[in-house]
Image (cartoon, coloured by chain):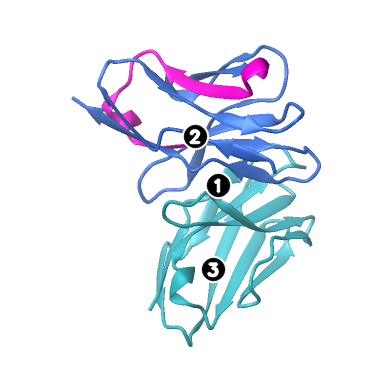
Chain colours: A cyan, B blue
Amino acid sequence: ETGVTQTPRHLVMGMTNKKSLKCEQHLGHNAMYWYKQSAKKPLELMFVYNFKEQTENNSVPSRFSPECPNSSHLFLHLHTLQPEDSALYLCASSQEGATQYFGPGTRLTVL
Amino acid sequence: AQSVTQPDIHITVSEGASLELRCNYSYGATPYLFWYVQSPGQGLQLLLKYFSGDTLVQGIKGFEAEFKRSQSSFNLGKPSVHWSDAAEYFCAVDLDYNTDKLIFGTGTRLQVFP
C-alpha cells in the first residue's frame, strides 16, 4: 500500500453506536490530521498530531475522540453521534508542516 | 480573520477550452498556497503549490497557477481542458509553516461538456 489509506470507506451508524475510523500513512510523515467535509462548507480541520502528540483540537465535540498510537496510524473514535455529524471524514499526513497528502476519506452517515 | 475565497461555485466549460479558477486570500503576509482536486467519492489530490520564488507554478495534469501578491490571488489555469478534469477544485493557504493549519476555500465544481 502507498500513500494514505482510510478504512472503512463507508460507514452507517445509529446515534447510540460506537465506531472507529482508521487512517494509515505509508509516507514516513510525522504529522497527521483529521478533517470533516460537509456539503457546501469548507473543509474543517478537526485534530492535528505531531510525533503522536495532539497539537490542535479545533473545538471539536467530545463525541469525537482521536487516538494516535504512532506516527503512522490515526484513529477517530465515534460515540453518540448526531445526524449533523454525517459527512466525509478525511485523513491527511505531512512532514513537519509541509504539504499535506490526503486519504480517500470515510463517508459517514448517522441515522 | 484569515479567509480563502473561491468566488465561483460552479463553472462549465467545453472540452478543449481554456480554464481559469479564481482564488483570493485575506492575510497580511504571503502564505503558502495550494490547489487540490477532488473527484467524486475521493480524497484530495495535490495539483500544485507555491512557497516562494517564481510566481508561475506548474503542476500535474497540465495545470498551472500564478501568484499575484498585489491582488492576493492564486488563480489556477489550464490551456485546454479534458473531460477527465471534471471535479471539484479547492484552494488552500497555510498561514504559518509551523502550525500545520490549512484554510480551505469552499471549492469550485468544474463541469466539462464534450
Which of the pair A62/A68 is nearer the observer? Answer: A62
Residue B81 part of the magenta segment = yes
Q: Which residue is mark 1?
A: A102
Observer-nearest of A30 and B23: B23
Residue A45 visible from this viewpoint: yes
Give the quadrant of residue A44: bottom right
As drawn, the residue found furthest toward the left would be: B114
Please determine whether, in this image, residue B97 is positioned above or below residue A26: above
Q: Tell me the element at label 3.
A: strand
Q: Residue furthest bottom?
A: A16
Kindly tell me whether residue B63 is visible in this rendering. Answer: no
Q: What residue is drawn where x is 48% and y is 77%?
A: A82
- Residue at numbered disc 3: A21
| Residue at mark 2 | B6
Q: In the image, is residue A18 above or below residue A101? A: below
Q: Secondary structure at mark 1?
A: strand
The quarter in which the C terminus of chain A is drawn is bottom left
- Please indicate whether residue A59 sits to the left or right of residue B12 in the image: right
Start-end of magenta stretch: B69-90
Decide if residue A22 is on the left or right side of residue A29.
left
Residue drawn at the location 69% of the way across and 30% of the way down: B32
| Residue that appears at 47% across and 47% down | B43
Q: Residues within 10 Å of mark 1 (few under 14, many from 20)?
A: many
Give the mark nearer the N terminus: 1 vs 3. Answer: 3
User: Which numbered tag is attached to residue B12?
Assistant: none
Q: Amino acid at mark 2?
A: Gln
Asked if A45 appears above or below B85 in the picture, the reply is: below
